[in-house]
Image (cartoon, grey):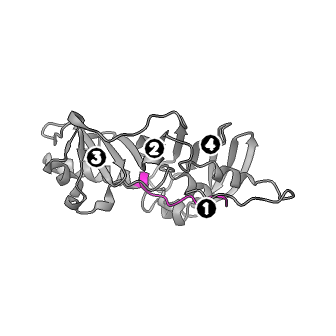
Amino acid sequence: MTQATGTAGTIRRTFGTVAAVLATASLLAGCGSKDEPAAAPQDAPSVSPKEALVDAVPDGTEGTFRFSGKDASSTLTGLIDHESKAFELNTTLPPDSDGIAVKMSFLVIGDDTWMKAKFTGRPGLPKLPDKWMKLDPAKLTDAASIPTYDGADQGNAGPLLEAATSVEEQSPGRYVGFIDVSGGEAAKSLEDGEAAALGEAAKKVPFTAVVGTDKHLTSLTLKIPAAGKAKAYDYVVKYTDYGTAPKISVPTGAAAIKAPAMAYELLNG
């Protein structure tokens, strides 16, 4: 392959953190770098569809851009600023069995992390300031549980496409094929235990992908089949606004505060 896509996990780690925060809120209420390809000789064969598709995954050289991700139960939207080693993640979880819904955001710039969280659906839920709350890693039980910047491909498209076993370019920029999510980094893009639950079906998950005229990946959709009590769903990653999305800057003044004790209580469970 012409690209080292890194490892999967940022979206999955964020979903896990938000789910843990939601569980804690309920209790308190009383209830995924691109290598430069070597120069090819003039008589070298053309790039394969898989190589072209993997090479379209963002590596940070595209400038700032937006992304979104969706799995069986949650959605993420965000902004990537590779030059600043920064990103913003926003997610909303629908009401759980206790009727509690949560909106949560993380802002990461280098080694610094801020968060926002809002809970609705029941009286007596934790109420946090509607500001960027800067987190102190020393006050976290598991600092690795919060998002960190580990590359431009925050949607894990690279690890998934690296695991493709069949890729066909149906028309210019439109690809179809199959991905083996049964193990490795591809399996880490799914929920814990999900790849194993899929059984043999995990080895041949159909996908579609679109690459823009600028040769950048714009979307990747995996058709995850049903497994046991889990329904079939679409795992979707989208990258847009390459080079035109705004830069990310450190929140200052009234927009930011130090995280209060309640924030750590929620994050530490």
Q: How would you rate the neighbour count of disc 3 (Cα within 10 Å): few for under 14, some for 14-19, many for 20 or more?
A: many
Where is residue 141? Give x, y as percent. Answer: 23, 63
Amino acid type of disc 4? Answer: His
Which residue is under mark 1? 203
Q: Main secondary structure of the magenta part?
A: loop
Relative depth, front residue between 38 and 201: 38
Which residue is drawn at the image coordinates 61% and 61% (left, top)? 203
In the rendered structure, which disc, 2 or 4, sits on the residue that comes first in sequence? Answer: 2
From the viewer's perspective, tell me whether residue 95 is left or right of residue 171.
left
State the extent of the magenta-drawn residues as a range: 1-12
Which residue is under mark 3? 114
Amino acid type of disc 3? Answer: Trp
* Secondary structure state at the residue bearing disc 4: loop
Amino acid type of disc 1? Answer: Lys
Q: CA distance from mark 3 to mark 1?
A: 38 Å
Which residue is drawn at the image coordinates 57% and 45% (left, top)? 221
Q: CA distance from mark 2 to mark 4?
A: 16 Å
Which residue is under mark 2? 81
